Image: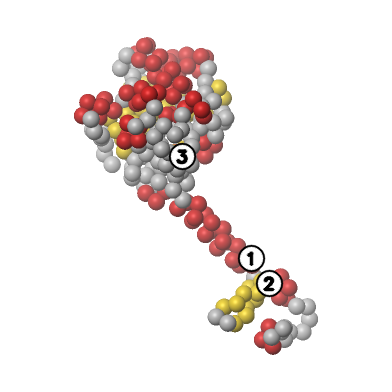
């Protein structure tokens, strides 16, 4: 052992739990526990700066992934869009956004099955005059198109356009234009799309109904008519 590495102390060698590192030619003994929080912090930073997944057009099909499950149903809330709303959280999402607000709902098997009983309850809740509409979120509604189209079609049958339908999606408007017929059909039947993955680097909690500044609140019928994205005219921030 080089002279400088020898322990000059008497008694037990307190360096037995330390790790030996070489810094600029000098050998040092450091306590690994001192470095653990930093290592964890670095790992966390790495996780948060990772980007969400980017599917190719038509790569993810609802029929391959959806288990027709619902993570949650929340009637009469004020946070998932304009006015008093009923919110259906479908299960399963593949975007894997770092910082996702609903990790459990990324699992397609999470929650409980979508049933006729639940659908009837949603329709009954929506029939209250003070309820403005239904919000679809998750999870990824566009990877659960069977369930979403079922409730969307029922709402249009029962209420026409008297109740509005909002949907959140990790897909952007432009991506949905190149997607499969079921996703396009769903898009054509909703009123508002809040589009795009949650980007942790662009997180802004002051935004209306969005978590990050890349996401947009899109007026779907107006955008379809214009052939380009038209932002919701009540957007404040
Ligand atoms: S798109 Fe939404 S639900 Fe899916 S991982 Fe991203 S934040 Fe989570």
- Residue 135 circle label: none
Q: Position of residue 77 (x, y in %)?
A: 42, 28
Q: CA distance from mark 1 to mark 2?
A: 9 Å
Pick whichever, 115 or 20, lies toward us: 20
Proximity of marks 3 and 1: CB atoms separated by less than 8 Å: no
* Side of 217 where 29 appears, left or right: right
> Of circles 1 and 2, which is in front?
2
Q: Which residue is mark 3?
A: 95
Question: Colour scheme used in the picture?
Answer: secondary structure
- Secondary structure under badge 1? helix
* Side of 4 where 222 appears, left or right: left
Q: Please rate how many residues cluster around mark 1, counting C-alpha atoms within 10 Å: few if below 14, some from 14 to 19, many from 20.
A: few
Q: Quadrant of residue 232?
A: top left
Q: Quadrant of residue 183?
A: top left
Q: Which residue is mark 1?
A: 33
Proximity of marks 2 and 3: CB atoms separated by less than 8 Å: no
Q: Position of residue 44 (x, y in %)?
A: 52, 54
Q: Is residue 220 above or below residue 5?
A: above
Question: What's the residue at 46%, 29% (across, down)?
Answer: 61
Q: Earlier in the sequence, mark 1 or mark 2?
A: 2
* Label 3 CB sits under 8 Å from any ligand 1 atom: yes
Quarter of the picture containing the C terminus is top left
Q: Is residue 153 above or below residue 190?
A: above
Q: Earlier in the sequence, mark 3 or mark 1?
A: 1
Question: What's the residue at 36%, 22% (across, down)?
Answer: 185
Q: Earlier in the sequence, mark 2 or mark 3?
A: 2
Q: Which residue is mark 2?
A: 18
Pick whichever, 45 or 88, lies toward us: 45
């Amino acid at each position: 052992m080089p002279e400088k590495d020898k322990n000059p102390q008497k008694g037990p060698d307190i360096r037995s739990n330390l790790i030996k590192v070489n810094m600029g030619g000098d050998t040092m003994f450091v306590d690994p526990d001192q470095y653990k929080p930093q290592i964890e912090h670095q790992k966390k930073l790495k996780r948060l700066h990772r980007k969400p997944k980017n599917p190719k057009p038509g790569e993810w099909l609802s029929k391959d992934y959806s288990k027709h499950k619902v993570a949650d149903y929340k009637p009469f809330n004020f946070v998932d869009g304009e006015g008093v709303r009923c919110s259906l959280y479908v299960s399963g999402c593949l975007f894997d956004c770092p910082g996702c607000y609903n990790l459990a709902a990324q699992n397609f098997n999470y929650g409980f099955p979508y049933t006729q009983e639940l659908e009837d309850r949603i329709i009954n809740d929506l029939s209250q005059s003070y309820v403005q509409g239904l919000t679809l979120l998750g999870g990824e509604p566009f990877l659960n198109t069977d369930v979403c189209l079922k409730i969307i079609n029922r709402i249009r049958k029962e209420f026409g356009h008297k109740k509005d339908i909002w949907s959140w999606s990790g897909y952007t408007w432009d991506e949905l234009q190149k997607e499969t017929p079921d996703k396009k059909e769903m898009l054509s039947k909703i009123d508002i799309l809040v589009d795009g993955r949650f980007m942790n680097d662009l997180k802004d909690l002051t935004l209306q109904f969005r978590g990050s500044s890349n996401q947009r609140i899109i007026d779907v019928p107006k955008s379809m008519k214009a052939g380009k994205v038209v932002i919701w005219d009540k957007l404040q921030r």
